[in-house]
């Protein structure tokens, strides 16, 4: 392992390696591109939201109960992800893995509810081809759900590496990067909750 420079000697583990610092910077740039992607999808949805083509409307489809359950699961997963990083900073490998697994289970719960929601809508005749509103809805929500799915598999891979290699600058960097990704998805969900669901239920 390369020697840690004096400047970064007391920095968090993920920042002590030069390659790690570059990778973290690169991931922040990647998140900037993701912001542009989701901003475009939100803009498209807002343009199409009123175009229901005599099909189901948000008032007919959206239910507060499942929505609150999804929101609670995902936002709680952001909290547990933060605890996992805190445990990493304390060099507590067991605590890191435990809280990371809890984060993963909460994410899987969110995905289960979202898949059930989509299946219910399709069963009621609300598909991506039904109207402009539903095209925008399924594209936006599907893209977010796909990102959560990728994050879930990614988290599994990181947990396996932590169990195999322990806590090193490389595994710490991977944990920190996926935590940034996970928090980003939670922020996106807050916007979805506000501008898609709540706005649709009061329109």
Image (cartoon, grey):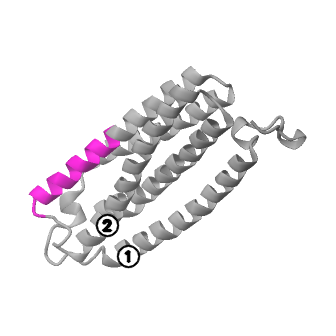
Residue underneath mark 1: 44
Q: Specify the quadrant of the image occupied by residue 2.
A: top right
Relative to the observer, which residue lies in front, 161 or 76?
161
Residue 92 in the image: state x and y as whole percent: 62, 22
Q: In this picture, is 130 found above or below 123?
A: below
Q: What stretch is highlighted in magenta?
A: 109-125
Residue at image location 56% in from the left, 31% down from the top: 84
Q: What element carries label 2?
A: helix
- Quarter of the figure with the C terminus: bottom left
Residue at image location 14% in from the left, 71% down from the top: 55
Residue 155 in the image: state x and y as whole percent: 46, 40
Tags 2 and 1 touching, CB below 8 Å: yes
What's the magenta bit mostly, secondary-structure-wise? Answer: helix
Is 97 magenta? The answer is no
Q: What element carries label 1?
A: helix
Residue underneath mark 2: 139
Residue 89 in the image: state x and y as whole percent: 68, 31
Residue at image location 35% in from the left, 72% down from the top: 45
Residue at image location 20% in from the left, 58% down from the top: 61
Q: Which mark is residue 189?
A: none
Mark 1 neighbour density, 10 Å: few (under 14) some (14–19) many (20 or more):
some
Which of labels 2 and 1 is toward the front? 2
Mark 2 neighbour density, 10 Å: few (under 14) some (14–19) many (20 or more):
some
């Amino acid at each position: 392992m390369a020697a840690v420079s004096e400047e970064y000697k007391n920095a968090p583990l993920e920042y002590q390696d030069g390659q790690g610092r570059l990778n973290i910077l690169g991931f922040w740039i990647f998140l900037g591109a993701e912001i542009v992607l989701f901003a475009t999808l939100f803009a498209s949805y807002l343009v199409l939201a009123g175009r229901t083509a005599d099909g189901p409307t948000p008032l007919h489809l959206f239910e507060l109960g499942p929505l609150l359950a999804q929101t609670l699961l995902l936002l709680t997963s952001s909290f547990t992800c933060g605890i996992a990083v805190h445990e990493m900073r304390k060099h507590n490998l067991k605590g890191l893995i435990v809280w990371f697994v809890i984060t993963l289970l909460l994410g899987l719960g969110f995905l289960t509810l979202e898949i059930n929601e989509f299946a219910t809508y399709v069963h009621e005749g609300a598909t991506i081809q039904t109207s402009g509103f539903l095209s925008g809805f399924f594209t936006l929500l599907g893209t977010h759900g796909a990102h959560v799915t990728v994050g879930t598999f990614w988290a599994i891979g990181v947990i396996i590496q932590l169990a195999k290699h322990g806590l090193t600058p490389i595994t710490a960097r991977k944990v920190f990067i996926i935590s940034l990704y996970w928090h980003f998805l939670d922020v996106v969900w807050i916007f979805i909750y506000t501008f898609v669901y709540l706005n649709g239920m009061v329109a």
